Image (cartoon, rainbow, N blue to C red):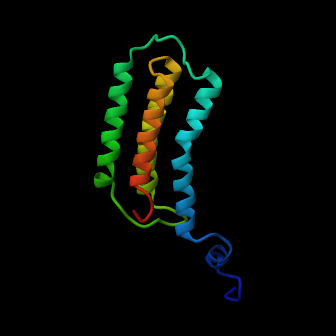
Amino acid sequence: MNGPGSDPGGLRRASGAAPGQNERIIWIAFLISPVIYLVVGRVVLGGDGVSAKVPALPVFLVGLLLALAALAAPRFIPRGEPAGDAVVPPARILSWAIDESVSIAGFVGFFLGALSLAAFLLFALVSMGLIWLHRPGG
């Protein structure tokens, strides 16, 4: 069973995209997700949001804490190469997920009526800036 084609890893390497390309595709998906949240929020609520039932200050504090955590996280997450079948190091994906959580906080605040569309846009821009800061090769 040592003939041509017996190496399952050989087929995988030859048929798929390069690991760097896969990493860039995942990064782009994280980068555009805040835009998708903005579109969904605008379509569902029409841009005005709901009447303010939740104070905005806690939402802004959560967003600020998440942004600070996103800036600090790469220093504390162990770096390494992808293990086994992983295409991207899990540390990078975790970092991008923390970056994206800022826009999710804005999304939730907008749906709860604590944030206006403009404030939600600020959360999305901060999230996209953090994702850009942690881009592959950057």
Residue 113, above or below 7: above
Q: Nearer the viewer, residue 83 or 76?
A: 76
Residue 11, percent across and down?
67, 76
Residue 2, above or below 50: below
| Residue 90: quarter of image | bottom left
Residue 99, percent across and down?
42, 44
Q: Nearer the viewer, residue 114 or 1?
A: 114
Residue 117, percent across and down?
51, 26
Residue at 28% over, 54% down: 75
Residue at 68% over, 73% down: 15
The reply, left or right, for residue 2 in relation to residue 121 is: right
Residue 16, above or below 132: below
Q: How many marks?
A: 0
Residue 92, percent across and down?
43, 56
Residue at 42% over, 65% down: 137
The reply, left or right, for residue 7 in relation to residue 88 is: right
Residue lying farthest to the bottom in this orientation: 3
Residue at 32% over, 27% down: 61
The reply, left or right, for residue 57 in relation to residue 49 is: left
Q: Nearer the viewer, residue 120 or 95?
A: 120
Q: Quadrant of the C terminus?
A: bottom left
